[in-house]
Amino acid sequence: MRNIIFLFLLVSLLYLSANGTVAAKPVIDDVVLDPSNPTPLSTILFTLTVSSEETIEKVRLVVSECTRGACCMCSRGYSEIMDRVNQGTYQARVTLEQEEAVAMKYHFEIKSDGMWYRYDTTNLYIEDGSLGFKVALFFLVIPIGITLLLMSKRRKLNNEKHG
């Protein structure tokens, strides 16, 4: 039994030394979207900065738009191989297609040393460019705030009279 364990360890060490070191997963240093707050139907420039450039073969951007009901990968441009701009920097342009989009999801996939690595999905709300909801919210919050302030003062006065 001891010989089998020793043989297993020896074979494992030989295998690891013959195959070299295991490649590390590339690190995403920065992601920039221009514009940073996209609106429906806008074109977005994604810029990705990655370290470990020497092992990177491809970088893929995957984007899906979300309406109130569901998220979809639309007809074109939603799984883009990003262009290498310079060492460690990749870019891709995506034009949003859903006029009713309220959010989008995107993630990156990087091929390094023959292996694809998938990175976490990022959710981003899409602004519709109108002030309608914001103005309505403003006119709703201000009266509620004033009412609460007046009620607080009234309670304070009642407590002083009775206290």
Image: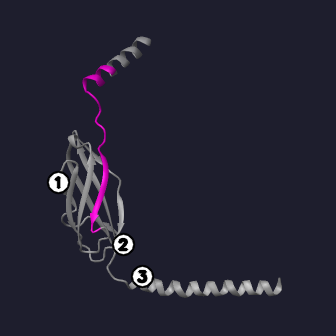
Q: CA distance from mark 1 to mark 2?
A: 37 Å
Q: Is residue 8 left or right of residue 147?
A: left
- Tell me what residue is drawn at x 31 percent, y 42 percent: 25
Instruction: Say which mark, if any, is on residue 85.
Output: 1
Q: Which residue is disc 2 drawn over? A: 69
Q: Judging from the image, what secondary structure is the residue with disc 3 in?
A: helix
Residue 149 placement (x, y as % from top left): 63, 84
Q: Amino acid at mark 2?
A: Gly
Q: Which quadrant of the view contains residue 40?
A: bottom left
- Tell me what residue is drawn at x 34 percent, y 73 percent: 102
Q: Of callouts 1 and 2, which one flags the residue occurring earlier in the amino acid sequence?
A: 2
Residue 78 placement (x, y as % from top left): 22, 62
Near mark 1 (Cα within 10 A), the count class, few <14, some 14-19 or many ≥20, is few
Residue 90 placement (x, y as % from top left): 21, 54
Q: CA distance from mark 3 to mark 1?
A: 38 Å
Relative to residue 86, is residue 2 depicted above or below?
above
Mark 1 and mark 2 in contact? Answer it, CB < 8 Å. Answer: no
Relative to residue 118, is residue 68 depicted above or below?
below
In the rendered view of the protein, which quadrant contains the N terminus?
A: top left
Q: Amino acid at mark 3?
A: Lys
From the image, state whether disc 3 or disc 1 is nearer to you: 1
Is 149 or 7 nearer to us in this picture?
Answer: 149
Q: Which residues are magenta?
A: 13-35
Q: Which residue is disc 3 drawn over? A: 134
Seen from this angle, which residue lies furthest top? 3
- Tell me what residue is drawn at x 35 percent, y 53 percent: 120
Residue 33 counted in the magenta span: yes
Relative to residue 41, is residue 58 depicted above or below?
above
Q: Amino acid at mark 1?
A: Val
Mark 3 and mark 1 in contact? Answer it, CB < 8 Å. Answer: no
Residue 117 placement (x, y as % from top left): 29, 46
